[in-house]
Image: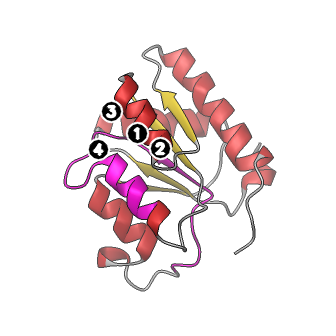
Amino acid sequence: MRDGCRGKTILLVEDNPDDEALTLRALRRNRIANEVVVAHDGVEALDYLFATGRYEGRDRHEQPQVVLLDLKLPKVDGLEVLKRMRAEELTRRVPVVVLTSSSEERDIVDSYDFGANSYVRKPVDFEQFMEAVRQLGMYWLLLNEVPQA
């Protein structure tokens, strides 16, 4: 999977250190060699996407290939991040995969209503989680086509 993925950044928005480590391990184990930028809360995610705060000076036109977005985040929750992304021309078309432990119907409906491209509940089982990340990487980084800026 390595060659087709080079140069495509993944933005992982995850506040739980264990889930962050597990996701990064799953990406490496599945040979997904993309740069992964980790945001630990909604504010940090928005700063990265819009090149503000600690990311000021970053080329804001270089958007991630995909955003893996948790919903339950400190400061600004995942649904608000998603709403703000879809409200701006710059980030409107960036693919967003909600990757969360929530299976609440309201979260699923709201995620799609606010423009999520996919909703994936984090499997509890390690091997199932590895397989889910492999499939996410295969689809969103290799198969999915995004419009040129």
Q: Would residue 56 be visible to someone looking at this image?
A: yes
Q: How much space separates mark 2 and mark 3, taking CA atoms?
A: 29 Å
Residue 107: x, y in percent?
A: 37, 33
- CB within 8 Å, label 1 to label 4: no
Identify which residue is drawn at 57% across, 58% down: 35
In terms of sequence position, does the residue under pointer 2 or pointer 4 come before the other? 4
Residue closest to the eye, 8 or 145: 145
Circle 2 or circle 3, nearest the eye:
2
Amino acid on which the number 4 mark rests in the picture: Asp
Magenta part of the chain: 60-85
Residue at which label 1 appears: 110
The residue labelled by disc 3 is 18
Q: Secondary structure at mark 3?
A: helix
Measured in 3D between alpha carbons, the distance from the residue under mark 1 to the one under mark 3, in whole angstroms, is: 26 Å
Which numbered disc, 2 or 3, marks the residue that appears first in the sequence? 3
User: Circle 4 sits on which residue?
Assistant: 15
The answer to whether 129 is drawn above or below residue 108 in the figure is above
**Circle 2: element type:** helix
Mark closer to the observer (3, 4): 4
Q: In this image, 148 relative to 64: left or right? A: right
Task: Answer left or right for 143 relative to 134.
Answer: right
Q: Amino acid at mark 2?
A: Asp
Q: What separation in Å lies between label 2 and label 4 (alpha carbons)?
A: 23 Å
Q: Residue at x 66, y 44 (%)?
A: 32
Residue plotted at (32% across, 54% down):
80
> Which numbered disc, 1 or 4, marks the residue that appears first in the sequence?
4
Residue named by callout 2: 113
